[in-house]
Image (spheres, rainbow, N blue to C red):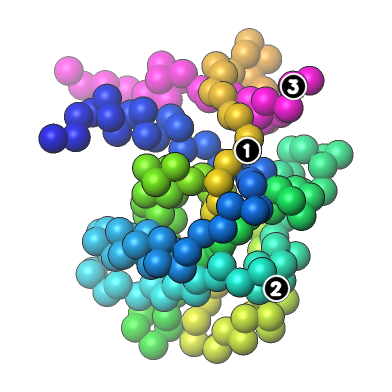
Amino acid sequence: MTTFEDIKTLVKENRSCRRFDNAAKIDIKELEDLVGLARHCASAANNQPLKFILSTDEQTNKNIFSCLGWAAYLTDWPGPEPAQQPSAYIVITGDHTISDKFWCDHGIAAQTILLGARAKGLAGCMFGAINIKKLNTFLQIPDHLEVKLVVALGKPVEKAVIDPVGPDGNIKYFRDENQVHHVPKRSLEDLVFKTFP
């Protein structure tokens, strides 16, 4: 049986990863497994309106990569060099022929995909900063599918750690001199507004 501590460990290990070993290829079956995992997630009104576009193709990956905004807080870093770019992508879309309201379905699906990837020894990053017009053109996405998120996946070469938010309240992630990626997180006490024991 999976314990709370198992889940806690998995969630803490699931940091947004932006540097990968591009030589470590991912089989399309692995992406199908991850979408299969997300298929079991809750969906508003059980409409299940999400459709997924999967890519492990090198040229398609380059096209997708060019449509994404990488690490806004790292202002001097334009994104990973080719050898550290993701080796797979899952584009999450909402199908307007099923519903015009996707609520938070795509967020639930993306987080589930990322947790599943981490359990497989992979890592990923969820993108909302997307040049959607360009991506629609590259992937020939029909009008009834609305791009909601892109999940980049690969074998991680980046070390990420969680830090407490300091007294200055700064929540911006950063890389130290050893290129370790630091992610400040607010304390539990800062998040719980009120309790009724």
SS at badge 2: helix
Q: Which residue is mark 3?
A: 178
Instruction: Please name the amino acid that badge 3 sits on.
Output: Asn
**Of the image marks 1 and 2, the number of the one nearer the N terminus:** 2
- Residue 197, compared with residue 53, is above or below; it is above
Is residue 22 on the magenta stretch?
A: no
- Graded by Cα atoms within 10 Å as few (under 14), some (14 to 19) or many (20 or more), the crowding at tag 1 reads some
Q: Which residue is mark 2?
A: 59
Q: Quadrant of residue 176?
A: top right
Q: CA distance from mark 1 to mark 2?
A: 22 Å
**Residue shown at 48% from the left, 46% from the top:** 122
Of all residues, the one furthest to the left in this rendering is 1
Q: Which residue is mark 1?
A: 157
Q: Is residue 67 visible?
A: no
Tag 3–tag 1 contact (CB < 8 Å): no
- Graded by Cα atoms within 10 Å as few (under 14), some (14 to 19) or many (20 or more), the crowding at tag 2 reads few
